[in-house]
Amino acid sequence: MFQTSLSTLLRKRRRPESTPAHPQQGKKFGEVIVYLVERRMGKSRRNFLTSLARSKGFCVDNTLSAEVTHIVAEGNPAHELWPWLQEQDVPHLDNTNVLDITWFTESMRAGRPVPVEEQHRIQKPSLQLKTCLPDTSLPTVSQYACQRRTTLDNRNKVLTDALEVLAENYEFNDSKGSCLGFRRAVSVLKSLTTALSCLQDAVDLPCLGEESKMVIEEILECGSSSRVDNILADERYQTLKLFTSVFGVGPKTAEKWYRIGLRSLEQIHSNSSIHFNRMQAAGFLYYEDISKPVTIAEAKAVGCIIEETASCYSSNVTISLTGGFCRGKEFGHDVDFILTVPEPGKEDGLLPAVIDTLRSQGILLYSDFQESTFDLNKLPSRRFEAMDHFEKCFLILKLQMGLVEGQQADPSRRRDWKAVRVDLVAPPADRYAFCLLGWTGSTQFERDLRRFARLERGMLLDNHALYDKTTNTFLQAKTEEDIFAHLGLDYIEPWQRNA
Ligand code: UTP
Ligand code: MN
């Protein structure tokens, strides 16, 4: 389970009590026995939540036995859940906690079972209520990703894959607005706990424009969309997709190469009129490796290298895994880490030292170091920038496969190492929470956090700070939870930010 293998990497990020040293033991809170209702939650999400809970030491029973103390359901209205529970002939049902997923989520966050409160309970409907007021209302879906919980268990992958092709194609055509519109639609669909079965299911959903709906309808009715199929078969789309898969090559450069008639990476390479910048040169040199996904085991091995390297600089450096792996992804295009030292300002010079050490170990294949341009006096920034001002570096490291846990020796490989993309960022300690929230992603989640802050709260949020325009003050935060609280948002766990 990736939660288990990640536990060591995550230990510095989470409070110690939330990640048990031996997650497999799973009996830390023996008095609480959880049963997750598969109905409406679905098998794969249930499996996911079960392993998550077990990795945190919770006891989860797969059967609805007499031992179960906490029954947890998601998306089940009381008038549906209770008759179903009664059909299961559960002994002592009236003495068992029947709870909404919010109790589970809060418990995962706390790393222990939180006390049951009234708002957690799915109340047994009284007979009178049942006949007069059936609760058929489904919870409404927010237009903001930061008010939705989006796990990796995507129930609408066929639809989101198709809409992502459209978004990407608009990006290649430099239509930012349309691209964003489709990305928003994708993100809403990813948050749903059930698969759409007809267009009618989508009527109340936000962010789905007419174009998105047409594609959805076509796929639900015919199994595929001719519009999407045409793009996939389009030479320009295929070529731009190939070119942008190279590290250092964005849509603009890809378009330039396409225009002069280039169609393959070999053609680019052998064209003497093309001059690569340093990043692109490295991108081509290590293409075979870095175009392959990084596995969680490889990320863990990189984490150990960075940890050892940074500890040569100071025993006070904290390494936190961030980015996609922190959201529970099993594969990534790179590995992202935040490095901090306790005293703000002392991080100055940390990354150059780390880079030097990596170089002297002979494992630095590429490095692009960016000095800090962070200036408290220049905040708040009103410009949305993908890049923040912290000291950071974009690296390619030579990872010895022998350091990767569970790695099978592959005699067909010509060499015993793999080139891996690694990003490091070193914010001042008092900026850590903002930096962590920004780098954990997903990109769509971040966009919506900022949009929500600005439009709903009159605040400016970026990777450096949160500024309240009404009171003209900066709001301080030590943890991500503090930032959600300042924004008046329910806390969303990293694994629920896969928007
Ligand atoms: P990534 O591009 O690494 O994405 O950026 P990811 O979610 O980890 O996905 P994979 O698995 O690698 O493909 C991680 C987050 O860091 C932010 C991005 O906006 C994204 O949300 N980021 C990246 C910054 O905030 N500043 C930067 O300079 C770079
Ligand atoms: Mn990443």
Image (cartoon, rainbow, N blue to C red):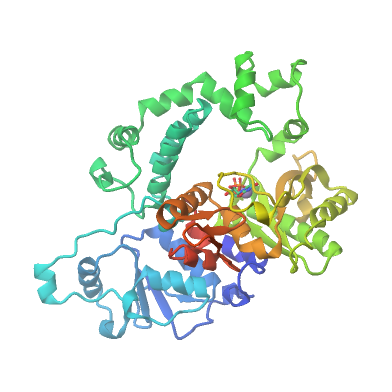
**346 relative position to 39: left or right:** right
Tell me the residue at 42%/43% (across/down).
184
Q: What x and y, as percent, mark residue 417? A: 78, 45
* Quadrant housing the N terminus: bottom right
Q: Residue furthest right?
A: 360
Tell me the residue at 86%/63% (across/down).
312
- Residue 102 found in image quarter: bottom left
Is residue 59 depicted above or below 460 in this figure? below
Is residue 49 depicted above or below 148 in this figure? below
Question: Is 96 in front, or is 414?
Answer: 96
Question: Is 388 in front, or is 133?
Answer: 388
Is residue 302 depicted above or below 206 in this figure? below
**403 relative position to 378: left or right:** right
Is residue 184 depicted above or below 239 in this figure? below
Q: Residue furthest top?
A: 261
Q: What x and y, as percent, mark residue 152? A: 48, 53
**365 relative position to 79: left or right:** right
- Residue 345 found in image quarter: bottom right
Examine the rendering and report whether any part of residue 408 can be seen: no
Q: What x and y, as percent, mark residue 116? A: 38, 81
Examine the rendering and report whether any part of residue 354 can be seen: yes
Question: Is 268 in front, or is 415?
Answer: 268
Tell me the residue at 87%/54% (across/down).
357
Q: What x and y, as percent, mark residue 190? A: 41, 49
Tell me the residue at 67%/67% (across/down).
8
**98 relative position to 481: left or right:** left
